[in-house]
């Protein structure tokens, strides 16, 4: 019976891991300095492949200092894993709203 419980627990954990939304990258690569180049950009906590961005955190404005390393940090359907240097947290913002790399 113990083996059956263990097998069920492993199966349940595997299903839960697949069902979880994609969350912001906790990068092994430090984020490259950039800024928000849109007048305003919504910043979300997570990205779900079925539903899109989830958990709106705040609005970033032109010139806010952020980080994203092209090729190292994920971009899902135009939503880029981004580090907000203000409160020091990860989230997702539209990729086209990130620019001015290494400008500060």
Image: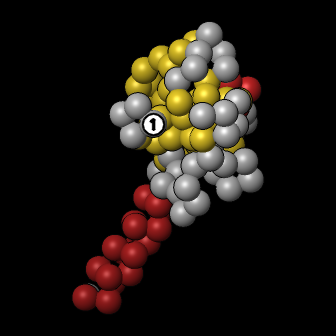
Looking at the rendered structure, the secondary structure element under dot 1 is loop
**Which residue lies at the image location 55% right of the left edge and 55% below the top edge?**
30
The colour scheme applied to this rendered structure is: secondary structure
Residue underneath mark 1:
85
**Picture coordinates of residue 99 (x, y %)?**
71, 30
The reply to whether residue 13 is visible in this rendering is yes
In the depicted structure, whether residue 54 falls above or below residue 90: above
Judge whether 100 appears above or below 24 on screen: above
- Of 25 and 61, nearer the camera is 61
Return the residue nearer the eye: 100 or 76: 100
Of the 4 image quadrants, the one containing the N terminus is bottom left
Left or right of residue 41, residue 88 in this image: left
Identify which residue is drawn at 29% across, 80% down: 5
Residue at the outermost front position: 104
Judge from the rendering whether residue 1 lies leftward or rightward of residue 84; answer left or right: left
The x and y percentages for residue 31 are 57, 49
Above-or-below relation of 26 to 45: below
Residue 2 appears in which quarter of the rendering? bottom left
The C terminus, quarter of image: top right
Residue located 40% across and 66% down the image: 12
- The picture places residue 27, in percent across and down from the top left corner, at 53, 57
* Most foreground residue, 10 or 21: 21
In the rendered image, the residue lying farthest to the left is: 2
Task: Answer yes or no: is residue 79 visible.
Answer: no
């Amino acid at each position: 019976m113990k083996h059956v419980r263990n097998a069920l627990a492993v199966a349940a954990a595997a299903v839960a891991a697949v069902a979880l939304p994609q969350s912001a990258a906790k990068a092994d690569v430090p984020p490259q300095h950039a800024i928000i180049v849109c007048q305003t950009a919504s910043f979300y906590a997570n990205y779900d492949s079925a539903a899109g961005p989830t958990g709106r955190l705040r609005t970033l404005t032109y010139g806010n200092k952020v980080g994203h390393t092209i090729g190292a940090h994920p971009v899902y359907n135009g939503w880029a894993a981004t580090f907000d240097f203000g409160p020091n947290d990860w989230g997702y913002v539209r990729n086209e709203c990130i620019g001015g790399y290494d400008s500060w």
